Amino acid sequence: MTYYGATDLAAAFRTVRDNTIQIAEDVGEEHYGFRATPETRSIAETLVHIAHIPKMAYELHGNLKVTTLVGFDFMALRAKLIADQKVKRSKAETIALLASGRDQFAGWLEGLSEDFLGQSVAMMPGNPAKSRFEMLLGVKEHEMHHRGQLMLMERMVGVMPHLTRRMEAMMAQMQTQATEAQATQAQA
């Protein structure tokens, strides 16, 4: 029995992407060019990089259905994606790119069979094989890595991350409820 299948993978990817889109919405367009250091991606470039993460996975597993990475020209695909990160986009265009990528990739993930997800893919020499499931789960993990960078950049441009705002609101509500419960007990 599989405990985490294609539907779960798609739902988890949607949740992660929705949180990334929230960051893209929260950051003012005037900050999209911000870089934490000169040699790092800007906020806009990071968002576009995130939008492109599923494209390589789809190329490998959806289009080509590779069984080995030996011989795959990563550098050609990488160069194409890096060039596209440099294309000037508005905030609205960037958010639309993230949203359409979410819908396309999650929709594709939902249709994958357990058999397909369990197939083994040979890595480059010296590395152990991975299942397609592990490689596709890596898409979400890669996005979360970059989302952590974005949350730090949000702080640097004066934006409190939405997950922090949500947690603080929940904690304030819990504190209010605890205070009210203590007052009720004291009156009894």
Image (cartoon, rainbow, N blue to C red):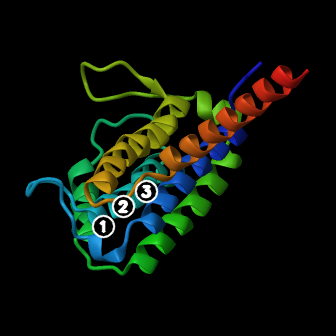
**Quadrant showing the N terminus:** top right
Residue at 39% x, 48% y is 147
The residue lying toward the viewer, choosing from 135 and 70, is: 135
Q: In the rendered image, which quarter is residue 154 located in?
A: bottom left
Q: CA distance from mark 3 to mark 1?
A: 18 Å
Q: Residue, x 69% and y 37% (percent of image)?
A: 176
The image's mark for residue 55 is: 3
Badge 2 amino acid: Leu
Amino acid, disc 3: Lys
Q: Is residue 22 above or below residue 174?
A: below
- The mark nearer the N terminus, 2 or 3, is 2
Badge 3 density bin: few <14, some 14–19, many ≥20, Cα 10 Å: some
Residue carrying label 1 = 44
Instruction: Judge the density around disc 2: few (<14), some (14-19), many (≥20) Cα neighbours within 10 Å.
Output: many
Q: Are marks 2 and 3 in contact (CB under 8 Å)?
A: no
Give the camera-side residue of 61 and 182.
182
Q: Position of residue 125 (x, y in %)?
A: 25, 24
The residue carrying mark 2 is 47
